[in-house]
């Protein structure tokens, strides 16, 4: 009887183990091992200090993850970085320091597959000093006094000059690129 009980118990346990083993979920046939791909473009690769460039995602795709699940990390090369969230297609960045900065994009899908984006055109933003100088005719003025600003070295392609007057911003006018042009603000 003891032999029969042990044999019955081992048969039941064996059957239970088989059932337990078959109750485990099946593995995915093809795990996600392919990184996303993306192409990007900078609108300006030559900018003056204090000006912005915009990065545009021309194409971002992944074989498994939805676009909203692909994380896009943008390194602007000047110490600044941002993320493009979900299906966001562009990001603007302002460059303050002179130099040459290579912009890179790294993206990661839900499975952790990562890759670097490619660029159409240059991925380098060259920041140069804004040309031209300005000089105020007077250091102190009173309310209602006219202020004369003399501009020099303004490039001929410039169509407007903006000056921050403190509380309000105003157009000085249409410079024609000639050195020594004076503009009046009242």
Image (cartoon, rainbow, N blue to C red):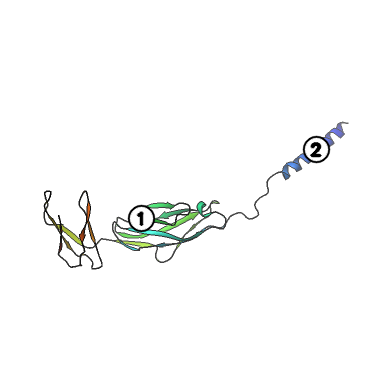
- Along the line of sight, which residue is nearer the eye, 96 or 59? 59
Find the distance from the CA under tag 2 to the CA under tag 1. Answer: 68 Å
Number of residues whose C-alpha sits closer than 10 Å to that of mark 1, classed few (under 14), some (14–19) or many (20 or more): some
Q: Is residue 148 left or right of residue 23?
A: left
Q: Is label 1 in a helix, a strand or a loop?
A: strand
For marks 2 and 1 on the same chain, the one whose residue lies earlier in the sequence: 2
- Along the line of sight, which residue is nearer the eye, 180 or 96? 180
Residue 27 x %, y %:
66, 50
Residue 94 x %, y %:
33, 55
Figure check: 77 above or below 158: above
Q: Is residue 8 left or right of residue 113?
A: right
Quadrant into which the N terminus falls: top right
Quadrant into which the C terminus falls: bottom left
Rendering quarter of residue 41? bottom left
Figure check: 15 above or below 80: above
Q: In the image, what residue occupies the spot 42% across and 60% down?
A: 56
Q: Which mark is residue 51?
A: none
Q: Is residue 64 left or right of residue 88?
A: right
Residue 22 x %, y %:
73, 45
Number of residues whose C-alpha sits closer than 10 Å to that of mark 2, classed few (under 14), some (14–19) or many (20 or more): few
Q: Is label 2 in a helix, a strand or a loop?
A: helix
Q: Which mark is residue 93?
A: 1
Residue 10 x %, y %:
81, 37
Q: In the image, what residue occupies the spot 87% across and 34% down?
A: 4
Q: Is residue 125 left or right of residue 84?
A: left
Q: Which residue carries the number 2 mark?
A: 12
Q: How many marks?
A: 2
Are the two marked residues, 2 and 1, in contact with CB atoms closer than 8 angstroms? no
């Amino acid at each position: 009887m003891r032999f029969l009980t042990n044999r019955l118990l081992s048969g039941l346990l064996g059957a239970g183990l088989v059932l337990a083993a078959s109750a485990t979920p099946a593995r995915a046939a093809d795990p996600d091992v392919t990184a996303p791909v993306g192409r990007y473009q900078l609108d300006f690769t030559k900018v003056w200090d204090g000006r912005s460039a915009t990065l545009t995602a021309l194409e971002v795709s992944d074989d498994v993850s939805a676009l909203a699940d692909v994380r896009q990390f943008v390194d602007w090369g000047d110490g600044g970085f941002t993320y493009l969230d979900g299906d966001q297609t562009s990001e603007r960045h302002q460059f303050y320091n002179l130099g040459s900065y290579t912009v890179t994009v790294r993206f990661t899908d839900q499975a952790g597959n990562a890759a670097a984006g490619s660029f159409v055109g240059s991925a380098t933003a060259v920041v140069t000093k804004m040309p031209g100088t300005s000089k105020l005719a007077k250091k102190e003025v009173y309310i209602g006094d006219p202020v004369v600003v003399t501009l020099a070295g303004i490039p001929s392609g410039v169509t407007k000059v903006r000056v921050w007057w403190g509380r309000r911003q105003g157009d000085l006018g249409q410079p024609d690129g000639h050195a020594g042009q004076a503009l009046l603000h009242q």
